[in-house]
Image (spheres, rainbow, N blue to C red):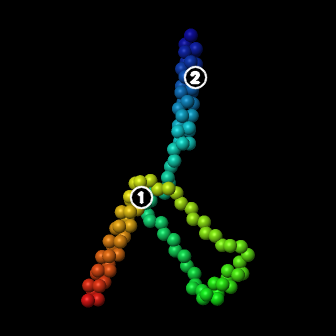
C-alpha cells in the first residue's frame, strides 16, 4: 500500500513538473524579448568621395541595373517615440547652447 502511494506521488510530481515546463515554454514562445532596449538615436554615416557630374553619369551608365536602397525599420511604441523626441529636443538644446557660447566668445 505504501509503495502505491509513493508511485502516485512521484507520478504527480513528474506530471506537475512537465506541465509547468510546458506552460513556461509556451509562454516564452509568445513573449518578445528585446535584447537591445537602448534608446539611442539611430544614425547613419555615409562616406564617399564627391564625384563630378560627368563621373556620376559615367558611373550610372556603367551599371547594369538600377540601384536600390532598402531601408528597414520597425514601428515604435508611444514610449519609444516620446523618448526619441525628448532626446532630440535635448540634442537641439545642446547645439543651441554651444552655438550661443561660441557666438559669445567670438564677440
Which residue in the structure is indicated by mark 2? Answer: 11
- Tell me if residue 75 comes above or below residue 63 in the rendering: above
Residues at marks 1 and 2, CA–CA distance in whole angstroms: 51 Å
Q: Which comes before the other along the chain, label 1 or label 2?
A: 2
Q: Nearer the viewer, residue 88 or 39?
A: 88
Residue 105: x and y in percent read: 27, 86
Left or right of 25 on screen, residue 55? right
The residue to which callout 1 is attached is 81
- Across and down, in percent, residue 101 comes to 28, 81
- Residue drawn at x 35%, y 71% is 92
Helix, strand or loop at mark 1: helix
Q: Position of residue 59 (x, y in %)?
A: 67, 82
- 58 lies left or right of 2: right
From the viewer's side, name the closer residue of 78 and 95: 78
User: Which disc is residue 18 wearing?
Assistant: none
Tell me: residue 102, above or below residue 18: below
**Going by the image, does 58 lie left or right of 97?**
right
Q: Nearer the viewer, residue 68 or 93?
A: 68
Residue at image location 32% in from the left, 80% down from the top: 99
- Can you tell which of label 1 and label 2 is closer to the viewer? 1
Q: Quadrant of the C terminus?
A: bottom left
Task: Report helix, strand or loop for mark 2.
Answer: helix
Judged from this view, the residue extending furthest toward the top is 1
Amino acid at each position: 500500500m505504501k509503495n502505491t502511494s509513493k508511485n502516485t506521488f512521484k507520478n504527480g510530481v513528474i506530471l506537475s513538473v512537465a506541465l509547468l515546463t510546458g506552460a513556461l515554454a509556451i509562454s516564452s514562445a509568445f513573449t518578445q524579448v528585446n535584447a537591445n532596449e537602448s534608446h539611442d538615436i539611430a544614425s547613419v554615416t555615409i562616406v564617399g568621395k564627391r564625384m563630378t557630374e560627368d563621373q556620376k553619369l559615367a558611373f550610372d551608365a556603367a551599371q547594369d541595373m538600377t540601384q536600390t536602397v532598402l531601408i528597414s525599420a520597425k514601428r515604435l511604441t508611444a514610449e519609444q517615440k516620446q523618448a526619441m523626441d525628448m532626446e532630440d529636443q535635448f540634442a537641439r538644446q545642446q547645439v543651441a547652447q554651444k552655438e550661443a557660447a561660441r557666438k559669445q566668445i567670438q564677440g
